[in-house]
Amino acid sequence: MRSRRKRVGLISDTHGLLRPEALAFLRDCDAIIHGGDIGDASILEALGKIAPVSAVRGNNDERDAWAAAVPETQRLSIGGVTIYVLHALALIDIDPAASGIAVVVSGHSHRPLVEERGGVLYVNPGSAGPRRFKLPVSVGELLIENRIVSARIVELS
């Protein structure tokens, strides 16, 4: 039996702003991962109307009571692929390759990134919230089929 392709939407650093363009991009996702600095519980509620959401708490979320229930890291399995999620990549406290992680999703820097290192795919969808400096406003996606993962970043207009 052929496996069905999974589309995982990636969003981070919304800081309380959920752009209509981001919602449109995430439509039809099988799952959504939020890389932290969510900004408001309503962001997760809105995303949850599209697909199941896994989120991590960002450094700017820590002062808000609602965010206490949001973990600092998550380890997920989607389509047979193990994904590790945390907000700030610099704070990673595991060896992803040795831990069987195929993909690390992070946020924090507001800089989009797709990079393979040591057999692990590192993805930062950038920031989908308020524009910061001259950095792009962006989201991303993972496409998983037969345990093979590809990632892309999409700039929002």
Image (tube, grey):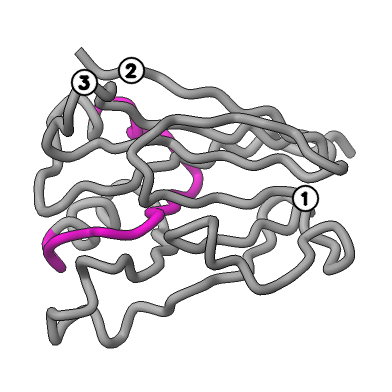
In the image: residue 147, left or right of residue 79: right
Question: Along the line of sight, which residue is nearer the eye, 90 or 17?
Answer: 90
What is the spatial separation of the Cα atoms under label 2 and label 1, in whole angstroms? 24 Å
In the image: residue 141, left or right of residue 129: right
Circle 3 sits on which residue? 134
Residue stretch rendered in magenta on the structure? 24-42
Circle 1 sits on which residue? 102
Circle 2 sits on which residue? 155
Image location (x, y in percent) of residue 122: 64, 42
In which quarter of the view is residue 56 placed?
Answer: bottom left
Image location (x, y in percent) of residue 156: 25, 19
Image location (x, y in percent) of residue 107: 41, 49
Quarter in which the C terminus is drawn: top left
Q: Amino acid at mark 3?
A: Lys
Q: Amino acid at mark 2?
A: Glu
Q: Is the residue marked by circle 1 packed among few (<14), some (14-19), or many (20+) residues within 10 Å?
A: many
In magenta stretch: residue 148: no
